[in-house]
Amino acid sequence: MSKLSNTIRKQVSKALNDYNMIADGDQIMVACSGGKDSSILLLALEEIRKKSPIKFTLHPVMLDQKQPGFDAVEFIHFMREHNLNITLLQEDTYSIVKEKTPEGKAFCGICSRLRRGILYTYAKKHQYNSIALGHHRDDMNQTLLMNLFFAGKIAGMPPKLKSDDGENIVIRPLAYCAESDLIALAKEYDFPVVPCNLCGTQSNLQRQEMKKMLQQMELNHPNIGAVMQNAQANVRPSQLADHNLWDFSTL
């Protein structure tokens, strides 16, 4: 195990502990996209599972959305060599996304909602305790800025949450991991990547704007990603302007 993989594993373990993500006997569905983040998440969780005093099982699930060029054969074979058997679900959301998305708009919104609905339904049907997603620290920071600048609200991606319908628990064990470290570790592992040929064809996405902005800021402030992460766990309701959080009439 390399120094970097050990660092990532420790960061994942810390997130699991800090946010009480796993309990004894849990059956955890790991949502695999075939990209670097969810792949590293799955491999890290498997390493932790083998050594953990807490007994839990992993159930990797991948969704074939019928995008052109989708081919998960090599990826599934790679994971099988690591004793991880991927369940492949098949749903044609690609046609729906192409049909319903107005020209010039991002595919990501409707695509993620459809994908989330399929995965949530599958997890509920099989009575999994939680769904592990591969969102990392940079994803969480970008989401915070997207909501602030484009949605007019202060909201982000919590490390652990209950879905809006109350039926599923979502966990993000990569919450403390920087994307730059995940990119470097993916090169070490050299696993086959299944690219997204839908959103990858679009430019000028809001998330990409936020990503570029943060990368530029990191040139002068290298620790800004960790600082933003800390800020999300250090909220001062009385120093905001939300009437639902603070009764200004009693001041």
Image (cartoon, rainbow, N blue to C red):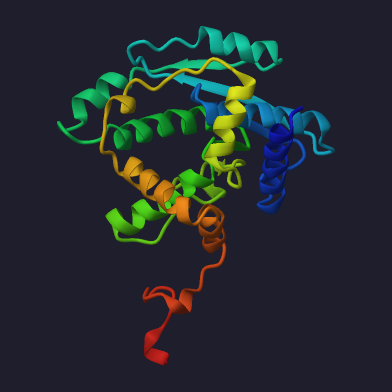
Provide residue 111's location: percent of width, then percent of height.
33, 31
Residue 223 at x, y = what percent? Answer: 55, 55
Kindly indicate the quadrant of the structure image that contains residue 9. top right
Q: How many labels does the image show?
A: 0
- Judge from the rendering whether residue 245 lies leftward or rightward of residue 5; answer left or right: left
Tell me, yes or no, if residue 123 can be seen here: yes
- For the question of whether residue 125 can be seen, the reply is no
Q: Where 159 sits versus 101, above or below?
A: below
Residue at the extreme left = 103
Camera-side residue of 175 and 241: 175
Q: In this view, does 223 lie to the left or right of 246?
A: right
Furthest-bottom residue in view? 251
Residue 93 spot, x, y in % from top left: 33, 22
Name the residue at 23% across, 24% down.
98
Whether residue 110 sits left or right of residue 196 in the image: it is left
Q: Which of 98 and 202 is in front in this view?
A: 202
Q: Residue at the location (80% across, 28% down)?
A: 50
Compared with 228, 22 (above or below) is above
Relative depth, front residue between 209 and 219: 219
Question: How far across and down, in percent of the image, does residue 53 sit?
Answer: 85, 38
Q: Quadrant of the N terminus?
A: top right
Where, by quadrant of the figure, is residue 113 drawn?
top left
What residue is at 56 percent from the left and 43 percent from the top? 178
Task: Decide if residue 241 is on the left or right side of residue 22.
Answer: left
Quadrant that contains the C terminus: bottom left
